[in-house]
Amino acid sequence: MRKTIFILLILTCGFGTARAQEIQQLPVPPVAPDFRAPQKPLPELNRVGVDMNRQRPLGLREALSMALENNKDIEVARENVRIAEFDLLGAQGSYDPRLNFSSFYERIENPISSFLSGGQNGSTIQSDYAGNVRLEGQSPVGGGNYRLDFSSSRFTTNNEFVALNPQYPSSLSFTYMQPLWRGLKIDQSRRQIQIARKNLSLTDAQFRERAIDTITNVQRAYWDLVFALRSLQVQRDAVTVAQTQLTHNKRLVQEGSLAPIDIVAAEAQISTYEQGVFSALEEVSRAENNLKHLIAENQSAPLWAEAIVPTDPVDLQVPVVSLPDALQTAMQNRPELAQSNVVKEINEIDQRFYKDQTKPGVDLVGTYGVNGLAGAVSTAGVNPFTASSVQVRQRVDQLSELAGLEPLPIVPPQTFSPDLLGGYGASLQNLLANRYGNFRVGVQISLPFRNRTAEAQLGRSLVEGERIATQREQLEQAIQVDVRNALQSMRSAESRLRAAVATREANEQQFASEQRKLDAGQSTTFLVLERQTALTTARGLELKAQTDLNKAIADLQRATGNALSVNSIVVK
């Protein structure tokens, strides 16, 4: 069996070798013989939508100021703070007194069914002009409710039993209900106000967080633009050096020191660096647009047509900070922790409120009122109760006179207090004089047999508190990781910068040495071009290390939460 397989393999290999030889003997058609790429001039180093004649010098601090003033995220966060302020104002409005006023005219005609009804022509007619005023509201202290009622009217009637017609009754009463148990320390209105204040603090912390993020993003975008512009300059310098090398190679070819192929190699090097120039130009455009997006007021701002020229040099001074100090600063300044504290405080307010709602309602209710009345003595006629006895009295007096007796004593008619005689003003005087007062004091109790709704809300708030505590621990751990990574990134960027500087210096020396060797005939163009490529790469890496260091410093400021204080920025 093994022998058979070996024979098959030999046959297969032999067949493949023979087939390959046949393919190699086939004639190969030429592909684009004598093709030469057309020599076109390179496009201009312009950026889309940017007038290169309009240079805009821009410092980092100015960029931060423009971002905090114009950035849309900052504007949205600032509007959220204003919304929270109006929410607080609206919550405080629950203590605004409410004034209600009503006025009406009423006429009532009722048929009479009794001789005691006092009506005429089979009916009684009464009319009145009445007005009521109520002032009510809630007290911010103790959660009490108050109500002040005032009413007055002008009453007229044809009822014969009414002694004052027209009359002006008036009344004034004050009622106050004070919770003694549920609602004494906290109620719905106070809960809403306290939560609104906490939400205002929450939106303020969110605004500070958005401001810190914006500062960090602007710093990173600024240094990205610095790197892109300097990288573009490095690529353009590389093209200039390559062109100088091409001229040098042509001179050596004329002198017979180099082969003509070395000119082609130098030209290829120039084309390679020219590609790098346009790639770097694209990065400049991207970095500039990113920065403009963060600091421009709107899409029609003149800044979009200007070429930004960063004026701040790269900061190579690394802040000296230890891990414990950085963690302590982060725990004091990170807005996320402030937001977590506010959320915890709001939950504590809910717990107090829902716990209070599980209590029975016991309210002290007190009312005090005064009444006023005035009017004119009715002129409707004789009192119906005494009209029928007038004739009897007269007959008795006649019989008494015939019998030589004295007439019946005269009973004086009923009189009214002088205070009750008058118009509407007299009624108000009687009211304010507090001649006819009344009061009532009592206790009102509300005792639910089961209060599952309040118990469920309390239980939910307690579980919510546990969840907030767990999230707080998770947040603190995430902040610790963030600070550690930012600090490590800054130190690594510092080390990479030192290495990049040493690498660039070494490559400069190697490139200069290789050029001298080429002039002495001890090197080749290939090695010179390799040294130039290495030098260009090293310069780019040094620039990147410089800007990476500045971006790492910005990230550390964000991680520790002191980006505002370090940059001397006060947000309002």
Image: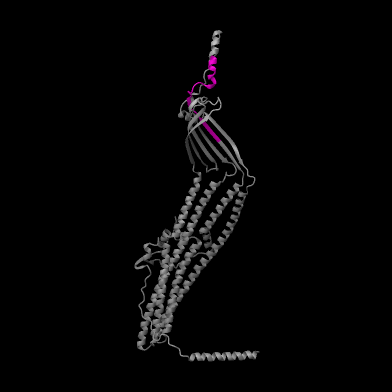
Residue located 48% across and 23% down the image? 380
Q: Is residue 416 above or below residue 243?
A: above
Q: Position of residue 467 (x, y in %)?
A: 59, 57
As drawn, the residue found furthest toward the right would be 1
In front of the other: 504 or 368? 368
Q: Is residue 468 magenta?
A: no
Q: Position of residue 122 (x, y in %)?
A: 52, 27
In front of the other: 3 or 520? 3
Is 273 displayed left or right of 410 in the figure? left
Q: How is the image coloured?
A: one colour
Residue located 56% across and 46% down the image? 187
Q: Is residue 520 above or below residue 78?
A: below
Name the quadrant containing residue 525.
bottom left
Magenta span of residues: 367-393
As drawn, the residue found furthest toward the front would be 122
Q: How many marks?
A: 0
Q: Position of residue 188 (x, y in %)?
A: 55, 47
Name the quadrant containing residue 364.
top right
Q: Position of residue 282 (x, y in %)?
A: 41, 71
State which quarter of the image contains the C terminus.
Answer: bottom left
In front of the other: 246 or 105? 105
Q: Could you tell me if residue 318 is visible in this image?
A: no
Q: Is residue 371 magenta?
A: yes
State which quarter of the image contains the N terminus.
Answer: bottom right
Residue located 59% across and 91% down the image? 10
Q: Could you tell me if residue 200 is visible in this image?
A: yes
Is 269 displayed left or right of 355 in the figure? left
